[in-house]
Image (cartoon, helix red, strand yellow):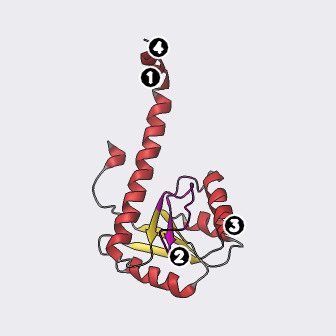
Amino acid sequence: MEALSQNQPSSPINVFLIGNNPIELSSVYTQLKQIKSSVVNAEIGFELSGLFRKIRKFKPSCILIDDNVEKIKIKKILKKLTQNSDTRDIPITVLKNSNYSEGYSEAQDYLLKENLTSEKLSRSILNSIRFKKMHLYMIKKYRKNKSRLLDLVKF
């Protein structure tokens, strides 16, 4: 299965950070740069205006959203990212301050900022990318073999 390869990606991983707290995002940025298993290119978006243009131009492999952004704005961002054909296949991870606040259904993964290490960040990003690729692979195969599957179900 081509989509489920366990090898480390040879191409750089592009990560787009969204948030409103430069201190916390710089900490996450530093953790990204300490990842040794692969090359990580990161870009940070503080301003929500022009954010989607930047994301489409940067073509990230993964998007990290800081939960310090207002909940309404996070929901708007997630809705727009999941509905846009250019960005809907990008895995989204929310960086959370606590485990007690609510989650977002559009986000694929959550990471607690407390005790965040480059290893945890790397593992989460790579797992998110693999999961998204597997999900897209399954959708593609399902659509291709849908009629055969329906024939099996009829009996």
Distance (Cα) linking label 4 and label 2: 50 Å
Q: Alpha-carbon neighbours of circle 1 within 10 Å: few (<14), some, or many (≥20)? A: few
Q: Earlier in the sequence, mark 1 or mark 4?
A: 1
Dot placed on the residue nearer the N-terminal end, 3 or 4: 3
Residue 136 coordinates in the image, percent (x, y): 47, 44
Label 1 sits on a secondary structure element that is helix
Residue type pointed to by label 4? Lys
Which quadrant is the N terminus positioned in? top left
Calculate the distance from the C-alpha at mark 3 to the C-alpha at mark 4. Answer: 45 Å
Disc nearest the viewer among 1 and 3: 3
Which residue is located at x 56 percent, y 77 percent?
Answer: 44
**What residue is shown with label 3?**
72
Disc 3 marks a residue whose amino acid type is: Ile
User: Label 2 near label 3: C-beta < 8 Å?
Assistant: no
Residue under label 4? 154
**Residue at horizontal 51%, vertical 64%?**
60
From the image, state whether disc 2 or disc 1 is nearer to you.
1
**Label 2, on which residue?**
43
Q: Which residues are magenta?
A: 87-109
